[in-house]
Amino acid sequence: MTTQTPQKSPLDYFPTEDEYQRLLDKRTRRGTAVRITFLLMLAVAVVGLGILLYTIIDDSFGIVAVVNENEPEDILAAYGYDPTVTVLSDLNKEQLVEVLAGSISSGVGRRLEREQRFFADRLVFESQAKWDEVCASDEPPSGCGGGVRSKADVVALVEERVIAPDIIDASRLTASIFNPQRFKDKVEADFLTNPDRYEDYTFDQVRFQWRAWFSWKFITSPASDKPEIAGVRTAVLGSIWLVAITVLFAVPVGVGAAIYLEEFAKPTRINDFIQTNINNLAGVPSIIYGMLGLAVLVRVLEPITSGSLFGDGAPNGRTILSAGLTLGLLTLPVVIISSQEAIRAVPNSLRQAGMGLGATKWQTVRSQVLPVAIPGILTGTILAVARAIGETAPLILVGAAGFITVSPSGPFSQFTALPIQIFQWTSLPQEEWRHLAAAASLVLLVLLLSLNAVAVLLRNRYSRRLT
Amino acid sequence: MTDTPDATVVTPPTTVPNPGSGAAESGTSSAQGTGVIETENMDVFYGDFKAVADVTMKFAFNEISALIGPSGCGKSTVLRALNRMNDLIPSARVDGEVRYHGANIYDPSVDPVEIRRRIGMVFQKPNPFPKSIYDNIAWGAKINGFKGSKSDMRDLVQGALEQAALWDEVKDKLTESGLSLSGGQQQRLCIARAIATQPDVILMDEPCSALDPIATLRIEELMLELKENYSIIIVTHNMQQAARVSGKTAFFNVELDTTGQRTGYLVEFSPTDELFTSPRMKATEDYITGRFG
């Protein structure tokens, strides 16, 4: 639509119909190009995450090359079973205990029995007199409390102590599925080229079997120096304790500080200064918090963090409490900032409505502002806690134990945590530990996802209640 | 508190002196005796900026008073100064006096929380709490120390909803969210909520500006009913509305000072029929005849 008039009309400054069509095409193309670019960026992120997950899962399962000290077939054959159709758990409990007793030293047997009895009606390794004496002592072992080992438990013991598998090499999941022969050839070649490497084993003894490094047994077993039986129970419990202390410390303190800053603080210079510093603290590297935790919580506040102030406690301040509070401090600025954002997002009209009815500031905040802000506060807390659960550096400084088989029993226990355990295992040279580290990473991811799921459920419940 | 749903007895505040003391005759007001709220030489500042200058007026008991005027003339500011809602803005400051039942509400000894419970407020945009309809109304009573039983509270809620002409529409869904109602219903819910704390003045800040004509009509009818028991002060952009509901109307105008600051001031405060038929001031006449604003 062009009109040729001597006098310029506003329309003359706009493109002609043809020009406009060209321009429009160009604009549309540019929009499409930008959209595709953003899609590619998203794809990069998704592919990155996918590769990460693939690597972890790939290492967590696969075929392993095992040499057994005793072959299960031999054990079965000794009891007259046909090894081709029966498995170890087809033996009855008496037979299994007999197999066990035949292989382990009487000292180990007594220790196992004191942990938990094999049979309710008789003792296997211990004499009745000695048993009564031990149980009458000041600190009776756990076996005196009753309870009998289950058959599955005995099977596990036989597998661990009698069959005593030694994993000499391991393969990854995809390689195990698509080309298992290559792994077998590689192990055989290793035996040929480097016979000293496998001590007194021969290739004929090697068995190839599937192994899930990531399994329920892995999660429930304590740490061990044998990769065949090592698990992450202590690390998982340590991480759960740490998260609990972190949340208990950082959420009330952080939300309280955020409420004060948003609702009560006047915009004075001091408050501005505090606000700026909180924002800066959120960006401080976590190792700095570790140094803070070491200097203040572990050293200065040792009487409190070791528990010695409250009776008997740990020998030093390198406890779950110190580490949890360190992670809490690390998390605090993020919790404060995200809670502030959530509180700020609550429409002012609700505050006015509350105050207009003759409510005090706190009544209004408590009943009208906070319920609306809680979903946002929870979202920020989820992110902050997710960061804390994966932190390694501050825990190393505060003194997480690298190898610990005793489960933490309270805030004053020594501890290890999943990231520490993963870090430890990845630094060991043998192939098996790398698979364990991958499986532990998977456990960490699962733990993280389930904690997040709980928080998201909570958040959704609150959001639903509001609308 | 009240046991019967329709009991709307206004209890005079105990902590404020009886009406009569220090009631000054205002220059532009023609009312006799004392009013429920009186302002004297009231200035409202936001920081250094003087938003409203020298307002002296007297609001009568059980009457609807309307505040009209062009945008930016400070009528909402004046309204919010009457129950200390301006306190919520950190930079706001009020000079002069605002007397409620004869006592200055800006006296340092006065707690604004108590003032706001006596002088309720309905806002421009309906702002029910994101809670159930029942809780929307019960909350105000609860936080103000309602001592009655559960059934007393139910009666109070029902009474407030009946007074706000909303009961029949919501009696079957009291547990549903206040946000599920339509705009007009939400605004009546807000009025019911304000009534439930037993105030004796209700301030309304353009209560119908977000509503359609039918909802507006309902609110206006409601105001006329409420007038029997409450003193109502309403800010409105709608001159017809002021003419329809109010007994007295105040016209505010705005003037530019030499630095370009806009300061509102009261032009005249007269009985509504007088103001619309024979305004005393030229500025009022220009405004109501549509010559500006």
Image: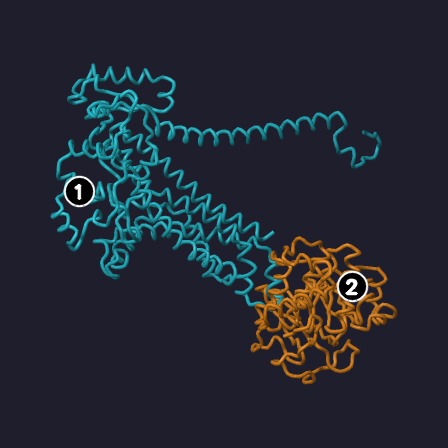
Closest to the camera, between mark 2 and mark 1, is 1
Q: Is residue B85 visible?
A: no
Give the chain coloured orange.
Answer: B
Residue wearing tag 1 = A123
Badge 1 element: loop
The image shows residue B289, relative to residue A19, as above or below, that is below
Q: Position of residue B247 (x, y in %)?
A: 80, 71
Q: Is residue A76 left or right of residue B110?
A: left
Chain identifier of the residue bearing label 2 in the image: B
**A78 or B42, which is in the foreground?**
A78
The image shows residue B67, relative to residue A297, as above or below, that is below
Report which colour depicts chain A.
cyan
Q: Alpha carbon of mark 2 to alpha carbon of mark 1: how far?
A: 92 Å
Residue that extends furthest to the bottom in the rendered view of this protein? B21
Q: Is residue B202 left or right of residue A154?
A: right
Amino acid type indicated by mark 2:
Glu
Q: Position of residue B250 (x, y in %)?
A: 77, 69
Residue wearing tag 2 = B220
Quadrant, the C terminus of chain B: bottom right
Residue positioned 15% across, 40% down in the render? A125
Residue positioned 53% across, 57% down in the render? A370
Badge 2 element: helix
Residue positioned 23% across, 50% down in the render? A145
Q: Are marks 2 and 1 in contact (CB under 8 Å)?
A: no
Q: Is residue A362 left or right of residue A411?
A: right
Amino acid type indicated by mark 1:
Leu
Q: Residues within 10 Å of mark 1 (few under 14, many from 20)?
A: some
Q: Position of residue A384 (x, y in %)?
A: 43, 47
Q: Is residue A142 left or right of residue B293?
A: left
The image shows residue B105, relative to residue A44, as above or below, that is below
